[in-house]
C-alpha cells in the first residue's frame, strides 16, 4: 500500500497518489485534470489557480489537514502582491502537496471550460480553440553548439507543449530575435493548431509574458447581410456583434442575378470578390472599434455562407453554380490565411476557417446549422428549415441525415410582394383578421401596440405604416385563408363572395386592403393575387423540399421541426402551418433556433473538435438534388394549395378550423415554377 | 511453372512474367523499372517510349519472336502520324506483351535519368525533382453524388499518382473549373512534392495535355555577385546561365559593413532586402529572356548563400550575425513561396528552397559545397576550402565532417592591395620572377601571351596592364619568396639585400616593382610591404582555420585538398603552398572544384533526395567556431610566416627550394588580427 498522499480533484473527481512535494499542476497533468497554464509552471500567468479544500470529506473518505498544501512561496507572494490572489486561491504550479487533499479547479482555470450559449440554450460550447497563447522560455544561443533561435524555440515548444512540428511565416520569424532578447529569452507565442494534423503555426511572437487576450470573428456571410460576432478565444465570450449589408447587392439582389452578373460581365466575379472582402475588412475594423480592441488581436475568422458567397469570397467565378450540374470548385473545409483573401482589419497572420459545403446548393451555412442543431445526434426525427432566399433543409436523426436546398425565392423576405419591404420600423410584422367582420388589426416594427389601440396613430407617427415584411405577409395570407377571404387554391374572393368591401377588384383579380392612408397622402397596403401566387410558389418549394427528404427517409411525419434563420425566429408557427410552409407537426414541437448558422460559426470558432465533427457529418449527409428528382415537381404542385391539396394537417386541425370556400370563376390555377435565386 | 511470357528490361536487367496482353508500361511499373509517363497511359505524352529487341539473347536465355509485342494500335498510329516515332520505338502504354521479350528503356524515357555535370565530372545528378507535371483525367460532376471539382481532382491524383493529400492556393484553384471544361475533364497539373512529407501542392493547372517544359533556377547569392542557372526540371539540362552584381554593394562592400549599415540605419536591413529581391527578380527575367521562355514556366528556385545574405533575403535583420554569439534567426532549410519573398520574374506559384545553414558564419553556400563535394562520402580525408571574403572550410571523411569559417578578409580578391583590382581584362593573373635576375614576367587577363613576348605590348594595347587580381597577388608574393625578395617573416628586402633595383625603398619599407609604365602615363604596379601584410593576415586566417579543424579531427595531414569557389579555380597550387595558405599536401592531390556552391544549388534543384541528404549531413557536421577557440589565435600567429613558422611542408619541399633569408633590420613583426567581414 502506498503511503504517498491522496489528491482528489473536483469537479472531475479524478484522484491519485503523489509524492510529498509534488506541485498541484504536475499532479493535475498526470491525472489528465483540465487545469490551465500558459507559462509552463513559472508562476507568471496565474491561469492554474486552484482552491484547496480543508476538513472532513466523508464522500471522498479523506480528512484534509490545514497544512495539506505547502505555504505560499516567494513566487506566489510576489504574484499575490502585484496582482492579488482571491482568498483561498493558490497557484497550482507553486503549491505543493504535503498530505491528502481535495482540490477544486474553478471554471476559469479550466482550458476546456463550457460556455453557455446566450441566445438559445440548446447547446453549450466546450472551449477547444485552434488558436492559443503560450509563454515559453527558450535556451540561449551557445557558440559551442550553434543553432538558430527558431530551432531553439521549436525545442522549447516541443518540450513544453509537445508540439512536434511548428511553422512560421517570414514576417513573424522577423520578430523572433528582438523579442527573445527583449524578453530575456522568454516569449509569448500565439499558436494555431487545427484538427487536421497539419503542423502548428506561429501567428505572433511577443517579448516576455503577454497576457492580452486574443479574439476571433465568427462571420455569417449572407447574400443580403454580413453578421459578425467578436469572441474572446480564451473564454468564448461574445465581446461585440455587428453587421452590415452585403455590398454585392448592387450587382444583383439574389444569388442568381449575381451569378448572371459574373457571366455577363468580364471580371464581374472579381468585382464582387473585392466588394465583399472589403466589406468584411470594414466590418472587422468596426467591431474592433466597438469592442475597443486593436485589430491585430483578432487572430482567427470563421466563415459560414452559401455556395455562391463561398466562391465569391474565395475569388472563384461562381458561374458553374448557376447551371446544372451545379458543381462546386471545392466543397471541403478550408484553412487559409487572412492575406490569402486580402482581408484586413485583423492580424496579418490571422487564420481563416471556412466550414465545408454540403453540395452545390447547400452551403457552409447549412453545415453550420447542422453543427449548431446536431440532427445527427438527435434521438427523434427532426426537420430543420433555414428559411432564406434559398431554403436549406435538413432531415434526420442518429441513423442518418439528409439535406437539400429548395428555391423559395425572396418572397418570404418581403421581396416581390407588392407592399413588401425588409423588416424595418414601420413594416407590418403581425396581423390578425377577424373571421366575422373580416377587419384586420396589425402591429408594426417599432411599436408595441396593435393598430386598434387608441394611441396607435400617435405611436407610429414617426415611422408610419410603410409596408409588410416577411413574417407579416405570411400571417396576412394565413389569416386571409382562416377568415375565408382566400380559398384553398389561393384565389382571393371578391367583395360579394367574402362579404367585405376590403376585397376590391383590381383588374381581373381581387386584392385585400389592409391599410389605406391615401387620404392623408400615405400608402395603401394591400395583399394582391400576385402576392398570394408569390407566397404559394415559395411555400410550395419549401414544403416540396421537406417532403422529398421525408420520402428519401421513408417517413410520413416528423417528430419536431426547427426553424432556423433570423426570419425563422419571427414566424408564427400556427400561421406557417396554415400556409402549409412546413409539414404538419404538434405546434409545441415547432421551435425557432434563431441564427443557427451564426451559432454554428461561433461553435467552430471556439472548438476544433467541432470542426472535425462537422467535416465528418457533412461527408455522411445524404445530398438530395431537388432539380433532378421527378417527385419534387409532383410535391411542388400538390403543395400549391393552402395548406395542401392532399396531405392532411391533423395537428393543425386540432387548433384551427379552415373554412371551405371556392372563388374560382375564371379557371385560375396555381403559379409556374420559379427559377432559383 | 508459369506459362506467362517472360519480360526482361534493359539496362536495369529487371525481369518478370506477365500475362499475354499486359501493356509494357504496366509490366515496367510492377517490376519497378524506371519508365516515365505523365499522361497516365493514355498515349498522349509519349514519355514511355521503349525499344523492343528481337532475336536470340543467349545472355538472357530467351528468343524474342517478331510478334512478341502487339502491332501498333490506333492510338500509336495516330501518335506516329502526328509527331513521329523513331524507328523501332513503341509507346509502352499501348504496346502489349505477346510472348517472351527483351525491352530497352532509352535514357530519355527514364524519370530518374542521370545528368552528367558539365563543368567538372566529380558527380552526376540523378533527376528527382520536387516539381513535375502530370496529365490526369478527372471524373465529371454527378448531381446524384455531388462533390467539388477539386475533390474529384484529388481523387484522380490519389488513384493515378498515389498522392494522399494535395494543397492548392486560391489563384490556382480559380483556374480549375474552366480548365477542366476546356480540357474535357483532362488537365495538366504541375505538382510540387518535396522530401519533407508535407502534402503535395498544385502549382499550376492547364487544360488538356500541356507538354511545355518547366524550369527551375539555381541561384548562388553571393555578397558580391548573384549567379543563376536556368535548368529544365525534367532533363536537368542547363538552358541558360547569367549573373549580376549584388546591388547591396552600395550599402557596404563586405558582409560586416552591411550588418553595420543595418545597425546604424533604421530600416536599413529592409532596404537591402528589397534591393536583393528586386535584383533576383530582374535576373530571373533576364535569364528567361535569354533562354526565350516565358517567366511563368519557372516553377522553382533554389538558393545558396552565406548567413548574412540568407537573412537579408528572408527579410530578417542580420544584426545578430554581427556580434557574438552569432545566432542565426533560423538555420534549417526553408521551403517558401516565391511570393513570400516578393520575387517576380517567375511563376506566381513558384516554390523556393533554401539550403540549410551550418552555423552563424557557415552558410547555406557551404552546405551546397558539402552537397556537391560530399566529404561525408569520402574514403580519404579531404579538406575543402571555399575561398572568398570569408573562407568556409570543411574537413572530413566517411567517419565525420567538421566545418568552420575563417575571416580571411578580401585580400585574396585583390581588395585592400595597393595595386589590387577585381579579375578583369588588364589585371595581372599570373607572374613568375626569375630567381637569378629577379626580373618578373607576367600574364594579364585578356591576353594569352606573357609579358616577355615581343607582341605583348600591342596585344594588350586595348586593355593595358591595370593592376593585380587575387590569383596574381598570390603568385607575386609566392614568387617573391622563392626568388629571395621576401624573407620567411614577410619582409621585403631592399635593393642591396636582394640585388635588384626593382626593390625600392618607400618610406621605411620596401616595395617590389612589377611593372612601371609611368613614363608613358601608365600605372606603376608594385607589391608593397602593406600588401604582403594583408596577404599574410588572409592566409594565416585560412591556414589557422584548416589547422583548427585538423586538431579537432586529431590529424596532422590531409589526404587531399579541394579548392572551391571561382577564385579557387584560378589559384596555382604550387604558389598557394609556398604561401602557406593551405596545409602541405601532394601537389597532385590539390584540385579545384570550380563553383561548387553553385553546383550544389543545381543538385538540390534537380533532386529532392539530395535535399534530404544535405539536411541530414548539415545536422551531423561538427561546427567549430574559430572566434572562441584559443588555439585558433596560436595557429594564426604561427601561420604568419611564409610558408609557416613551425609546420613543415615536405611535399612542397620536394618541388621547390625556398631560400633562407632575413631582412629584419627594424624589428618588424607580423600583422594584427583582422576583423571579420
Image: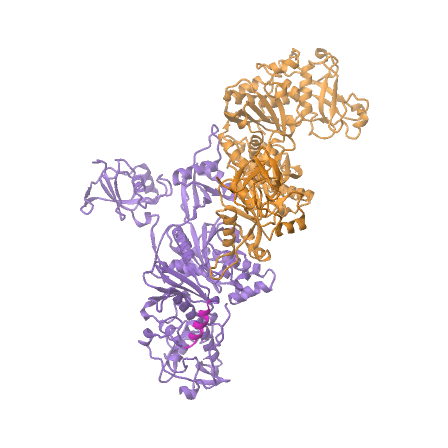
Chain colours: A purple, B orange
Given residues A231 and A333, the one toward you in this image is A333
Q: Is residue B551 visible?
A: yes
* Residue A640 highlighted magenta (yes or no): yes
Snapshot quadrant of residue B673? top right
Q: Is residue A515 above or below residue A387?
A: below
Horizontal arrangement in the rendering, residue B564 relative to residue A289 (left or right): right
Residue B311 horizontal/vertical position (percent): 55, 37
Predominant secondary structure, magenta span: helix
The quarter holding residue A657 reads bottom left
Tell me what residue is drawn at x 50 percent, y 29 percent.
B621
Q: Position of residue B365 (x, y in %)?
A: 58, 33
Frontmost residue, A278 versus A353: A353
Instruction: Please give left or right for residue B507 compared with residue B617 in the image.
Output: right
Is B84 or B567 nearer to us in this picture? B84
Position of B489 with respect to A558 (left or right) is right
Quadrant placement of the N terminus of chain A: top left
Asked whether residue A463 is in view, the answer is no
Residue B594: % across, % down: 64, 29
Q: Is residue B584 above or below residue B677?
A: above
Magenta span of residues: A629-641
| B495 in magenta | no
Q: Position of residue A142 (x, y in %)?
A: 46, 30
Look at the picture and state if B222 lies above or below A108: above
The answer to which quarter of the image holds residue A7 is top left
* Label tally: 0
Residue furthest to the bottom: A496
Amino acid at each position: 500500500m502506498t503511503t504517498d498522499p491522496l489528491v482528489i480533484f473536483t469537479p472531475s473527481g479524478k484522484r491519485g497518489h503523489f509524492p510529498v512535494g509534488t506541485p498541484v499542476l504536475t499532479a493535475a497533468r498526470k491525472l489528465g485534470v483540465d487545469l490551465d497554464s500558459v507559462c509552463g509552471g513559472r508562476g507568471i500567468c496565474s491561469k492554474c489557480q486552484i482552491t484547496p479544500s480543508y476538513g472532513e470529506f466523508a464522500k471522498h473518505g479523506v480528512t484534509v489537514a490545514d497544512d495539506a498544501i505547502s505555504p505560499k512561496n516567494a513566487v506566489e507572494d510576489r504574484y499575490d502582491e502585484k496582482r492579488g490572489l482571491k482568498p483561498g486561491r493558490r497557484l497550482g504550479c507553486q503549491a505543493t502537496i504535503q498530505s491528502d487533499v481535495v482540490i477544486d479547479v474553478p471554471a476559469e482555470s479550466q482550458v476546456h471550460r463550457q460556455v453557455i450559449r446566450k441566445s438559445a440554450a440548446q447547446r453549450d460550447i466546450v472551449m477547444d480553440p485552434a488558436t492559443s497563447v503560450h509563454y515559453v522560455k527558450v535556451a540561449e544561443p551557445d557558440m559551442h553548439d550553434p543553432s538558430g533561435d527558431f530551432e531553439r524555440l521549436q525545442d522549447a515548444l516541443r518540450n513544453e507543449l509537445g508540439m512536434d512540428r511548428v511553422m512560421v511565416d517570414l514576417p513573424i520569424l522577423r520578430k523572433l530575435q528582438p523579442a527573445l532578447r527583449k524578453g530575456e529569452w522568454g516569449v509569448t507565442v500565439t499558436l494555431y493548431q487545427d484538427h487536421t494534423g497539419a503542423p502548428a503555426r506561429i501567428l505572433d511572437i511577443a517579448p516576455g509574458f503577454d497576457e492580452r487576450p486574443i479574439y476571433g470573428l465568427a462571420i455569417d456571410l449572407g447574400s443580403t447581410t454580413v453578421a459578425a460576432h467578436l469572441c474572446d478565444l480564451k473564454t468564448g465570450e461574445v465581446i461585440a456583434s455587428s453587421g452590415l449589408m452585403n455590398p454585392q447587392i448592387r450587382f444583383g439582389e439574389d444569388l442568381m442575378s449575381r451569378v448572371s452578373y459574373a457571366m455577363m460581365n468580364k471580371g464581374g466575379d472579381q468585382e464582387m470578390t473585392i466588394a465583399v472582402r472589403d466589406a468584411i475588412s470594414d466590418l472587422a475594423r468596426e467591431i474592433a472599434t466597438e469592442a475597443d480592441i486593436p485589430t491585430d488581436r483578432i487572430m482567427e475568422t470563421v466563415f459560414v455562407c452559401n455556395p455562391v458567397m463561398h466562391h465569391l469570397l474565395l475569388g472563384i467565378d461562381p458561374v458553374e453554380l448557376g447551371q446544372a450540374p451545379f458543381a462546386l470548385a471545392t466543397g471541403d473545409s478550408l484553412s487559409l490565411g487572412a492575406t490569402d483573401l486580402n482581408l484586413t482589419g485583423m492580424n496579418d497572420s490571422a487564420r481563416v476557417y471556412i466550414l465545408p459545403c454540403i453540395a452545390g446548393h447547400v452551403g457552409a451555412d447549412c453545415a453550420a446549422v447542422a453543427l449548431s442543431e446536431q440532427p445527427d445526434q438527435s434521438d427523434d426525427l427532426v426537420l430543420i428549415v433555414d428559411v432564406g432566399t434559398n431554403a436549406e433543409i435538413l432531415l434526420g436523426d442518429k441513423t442518418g441525415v439528409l439535406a437539400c436546398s429548395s428555391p423559395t425565392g425572396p418572397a418570404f423576405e418581403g421581396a416581390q410582394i407588392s407592399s413588401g419591404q425588409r423588416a424595418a420600423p414601420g413594416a407590418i410584422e403581425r396581423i390578425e383578421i377577424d373571421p366575422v367582420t373580416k377587419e384586420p388589426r396589425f402591429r408594426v416594427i417599432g411599436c408595441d401596440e396593435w393598430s386598434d389601440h387608441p394611441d396607435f396613430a400617435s405611436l407610429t407617427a414617426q415611422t408610419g405604416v410603410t409596408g409588410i415584411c416577411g413574417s407579416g405577409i405570411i400571417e396576412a395570407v394565413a389569416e386571409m385563408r382562416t377568415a375565408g377571404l382566400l380559398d384553398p387554391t389561393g384565389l382571393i374572393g371578391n367583395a360579394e363572395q367574402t362579404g367585405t368591401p376590403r376585397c376590391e377588384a383590381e383588374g381581373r383579380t381581387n386584392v385585400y386592403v389592409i391599410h389605406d392612408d391615401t387620404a392623408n397622402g400615405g400608402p395603401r397596403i394591400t395583399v394582391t393575387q400576385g402576392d398570394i401566387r408569390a407566397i404559394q410558389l415559395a411555400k410550395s418549394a419549401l414544403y416540396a423540399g421537406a417532403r422529398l427528404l421525408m420520402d428519401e427517409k421513408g417517413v410520413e411525419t416528423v417528430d419536431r421541426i426547427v426553424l432556423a434563420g433570423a426570419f425563422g425566429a419571427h414566424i408564427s408557427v400556427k400561421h406557417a402551418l396554415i400556409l402549409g410552409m412546413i409539414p404538419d407537426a404538434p405546434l409545441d414541437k415547432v421551435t425557432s433556433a434563431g441564427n443557427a448558422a451564426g451559432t454554428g460559426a461561433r461553435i467552430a470558432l471556439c472548438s476544433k473538435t467541432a470542426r472535425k465533427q462537422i467535416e465528418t457529418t457533412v461527408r455522411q449527409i445524404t445530398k438530395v438534388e431537388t432539380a433532378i428528382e421527378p417527385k419534387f415537381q409532383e410535391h411542388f404542385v400538390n403543395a400549391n394549395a393552402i395548406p395542401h391539396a392532399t396531405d392532411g394537417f391533423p395537428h393543425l386541425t386540432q387548433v384551427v378550423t379552415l373554412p371551405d370556400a371556392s372563388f374560382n370563376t375564371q379557371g385560375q390555377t396555381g403559379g409556374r415554377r420559379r427559377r432559383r435565386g
